[in-house]
Amino acid sequence: MKKILLTGAAGFIGSNTASALLRRGDTVVGVDNLNDYYDPARKRANLEEVRTTAPDPQKFIFHTEDIRDEDAMEGLFAEHEFDAIIHLAAMAGVRASIEDPKLYFDVNLGGTLTLLEAAQRHGQPRFVFASTSSVYGRTKVIPFIETDSADRPLAPYPASKRAAELLGYSYFHLFGQNFTALRFFTVYGRRGRPDMMAYLVLDNIFRGKEVPVYNHGQMHRDWTYVDDIVQGLLAAADRPLGYEVINLGRGKPTLLADFVRLIEEQAGKVSNLIDRPMPAADMEYTYANINRARELLGYAPTVTVEQGVREFWLWYQDAVMGVSQ
């Protein structure tokens, strides 16, 4: 049994990770500032679901704190002896980062620095960092592989994540800090964020929300169900790997238009999305080479896009529409 510091614990991937850790008997110290990037009520609902489904709810200790607060983070590290840090807290969203780049670097780089500094003072627990496939930019190396320089990010969000990866290397080089950066590829699934495509398509169908689709849906994404991502996160938290950067995707890209069609088939209704030109910050293609994840983490994604969309639809009906299955 381990004690894990989990940042971003109330969010989409964070709450699913918390549930998985608790199911295997770990103690989870969760941190989230419950900011208003999207409705904090959604995050509080995630936390409630984590607590009510946990085998032992007392093993979930939650703090409403900001990772940039040095005193608060120092207090947590002083109180608990962590085996690992799973650092998911971040300002997310490629396009939103263009509007407020300073905030994105303050949180995504500065917050990571605060945690790394606290880790140095308190036993250097293994550090797992959530990065993004967006760091690859418009690379010509397909499928995306970790040996790519990834030095041409298209927006402040991926630039901040790439900077944090490099910061992690500095702490590994200087202090021997185990630091694994996991580059996530288009994650979707239960407890998904309201600004993500799967959620938006259903909001368009059932709530009439205006939703753009770029380039007639002719963009490929390596859609990866959240349970597979969580599998990789837990494996990384268990393994001291020195410094590693590892892709976590499904390794099988799907056309956006086809993904939308699968959602429509589950909902039994057609969406009315608005076609828009592809923004300058977007990528036409994401496709993960997951050989390194298989080798180092025993990573083996199992959820097909068809299965994942079905699971997301079931969750959306229950959690958003209030229709029990």
Image (cartoon, helix red, strand yellow):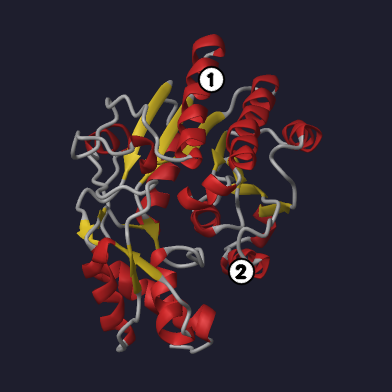
Left or right: 54 with respect to 198? Answer: right
Q: Residue 273: name its quadrant.
A: bottom left
- Which one is in front, 234 or 274? 274
**Which SS class for mark 2?**
helix
Question: Residue at coordinates 27% horizontally, 27% vertically from top-left?
Answer: 148
- Which one is in front, 174 or 29? 174
Q: Position of residue 215 (x, y in %)?
A: 27, 61
Q: Amino acid at mark 1?
A: Gln
**Can you identify the residue that label 1 sits on?**
177
Q: Position of residue 24 (x, y in %)?
A: 49, 52
- The image shows residue 252, relative to residue 137, as above or below, that is below
Point out the residue furthest to the front here. 277
Q: Position of residue 138 (x, y in %)?
A: 28, 39
Left or right: 79 with respect to 164? Answer: right
Q: Are marks 2 and 1 in contact (CB under 8 Å)?
A: no
Question: Residue at coordinates 59% horizontally, 45% vertically from top-left?
Answer: 89
- The image shows residue 218, relative to residue 77, as above or below, that is below
**Which SS class for mark 1?**
loop
Q: Position of residue 256 (x, y in %)?
A: 26, 63
- The image shows residue 162, relative to residue 280, as above or below, that is above
Q: Residues within 10 Å of mark 1 (few under 14, many from 20)?
A: many
**Can you identify the residue that label 2 sits on?**
42
Q: Quadrant of the C terminus?
A: bottom left
Q: Could you tell me if residue 304 is visible in this image? A: no
Q: Amino acid at mark 2?
A: Arg
Left or right: 43 with respect to 24? Answer: right
Mark in the foreground, 2 or 1 = 2
Label 2 or label 1, whichever comes before in sequence order: 2
Q: Residues within 10 Å of mark 2 (few under 14, many from 20)?
A: many
